[in-house]
C-alpha cells in the first residue's frame, strides 16, 4: 500500500459517510439545527465539501468543481462563489438548504476529482510546499491530511445531528 492509497482510502471513507448521513433525509431535516447557533447537516456537508473542493483545486492549480461544473448555480446560495462557509455566522448557516441528492451529487463530483488527483501523486509531490504562510511551511501531504481531518470532524458532527433527529 502506498501513501496515495491511504489518502484515497480516507477520502473514500468521507464520501461513504456523507452518503450515509444524508440518506433519506428531507430538506427540512437536513436544515435542522439543535439550537440557533448550531450547524445543520446541510451546512456541515456543504462546508466540508466546499473546503475539500477549494483546497484540492488550489493544490492542483485548477478551477473548483463548485464553479467549473455549475454547482454554485444549482445550490443558488446567497454567498459569493468563493465562499466555503469558513467564518459563517448562524444567520448564514441557516441559509444553506439543499436536498440530499444535491449534497451527495456535489460531494461525489468533488470526490471523483480529488481521487483522480491524489492517485497521480507520489512521495515527491506530497513533499511539495503549497503554503508558505505557515511556520513550518505546509506541504501538499500535510494539506491533504488537514482536509481529511477537517472533513472527518464535520461529517462526524453531521452524523451526531442525524442521531439527534432520530430521537425527536
Image (cartoon, rainbow, N blue to C red):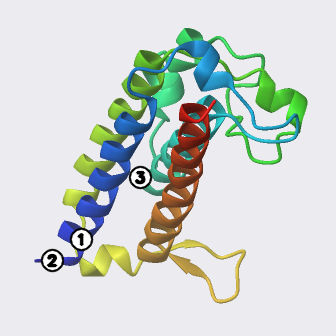
Callout 3: helix, strand or loop? Answer: helix
Between disc 3 and disc 1, whose residue precedes? 1
Between disc 3 and disc 2, whose residue precedes? 2
Q: How far apart are marks 3 and 1 (CA)?
A: 19 Å
CB of mark 3 within 8 Å of CB of mark 2? no
Q: Distance between the residues labelled 3 and 2?
A: 20 Å
| Residue at mark 3 | 60
Q: In this view, does 18 lie to the left or right of 40?
A: left
| Residue at mark 1 | 6
Q: Nearer the viewer, residue 162 or 109?
A: 162
| Residue at mark 2 | 2
At which x and y percent is residue 62? 44, 41
Q: In this view, does 67 lie to the left or right of 140?
A: right
Mark toward the viewer: 2 or 1: 1
CB of mark 2 within 8 Å of CB of mark 1? yes
Residue at 70%, 87% in the rendered image: 135
Image quarter hosting the C terminus? top right
Mark toward the viewer: 3 or 2: 2
Q: In this view, does 145 lie to the left or right of 10?
A: right
Relative to 8, say whether 134 is above or below.
below
Callout 2: helix, strand or loop? Answer: loop
On the image, which quarter does residue 39 sit in? top right
Amino acid at each position: 500500500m502506498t501513501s496515495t492509497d491511504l489518502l484515497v482510502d480516507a477520502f473514500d471513507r468521507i464520501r461513504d459517510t456523507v452518503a450515509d448521513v444524508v440518506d433519506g433525509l428531507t430538506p427540512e431535516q437536513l436544515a435542522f439545527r439543535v439550537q440557533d447557533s448550531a450547524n445543520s447537516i446541510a451546512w456541515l456537508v456543504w462546508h466540508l465539501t466546499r473546503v475539500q473542493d477549494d483546497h484540492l483545486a488550489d493544490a492542483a492549480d485548477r478551477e473548483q468543481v463548485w464553479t467549473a461544473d455549475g454547482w454554485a448555480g444549482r445550490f443558488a446560495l446567497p454567498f459569493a462563489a468563493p465562499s466555503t462557509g469558513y467564518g459563517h455566522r448562524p444567520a448564514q448557516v441557516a441559509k444553506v438548504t439543499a436536498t440530499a441528492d444535491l449534497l451527495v451529487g456535489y460531494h461525489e463530483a468533488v470526490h471523483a476529482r480529488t481521487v483522480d488527483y491524489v492517485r497521480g501523486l507520489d512521495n515527491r509531490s506530497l513533499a511539495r510546499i503549497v503554503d508558505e504562510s505557515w511556520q513550518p511551511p505546509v506541504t501538499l501531504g500535510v494539506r491533504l491530511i488537514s482536509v481529511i481531518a477537517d472533513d472527518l470532524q464535520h461529517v462526524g458532527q453531521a452524523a451526531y445531528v442525524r442521531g439527534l433527529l432520530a430521537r425527536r
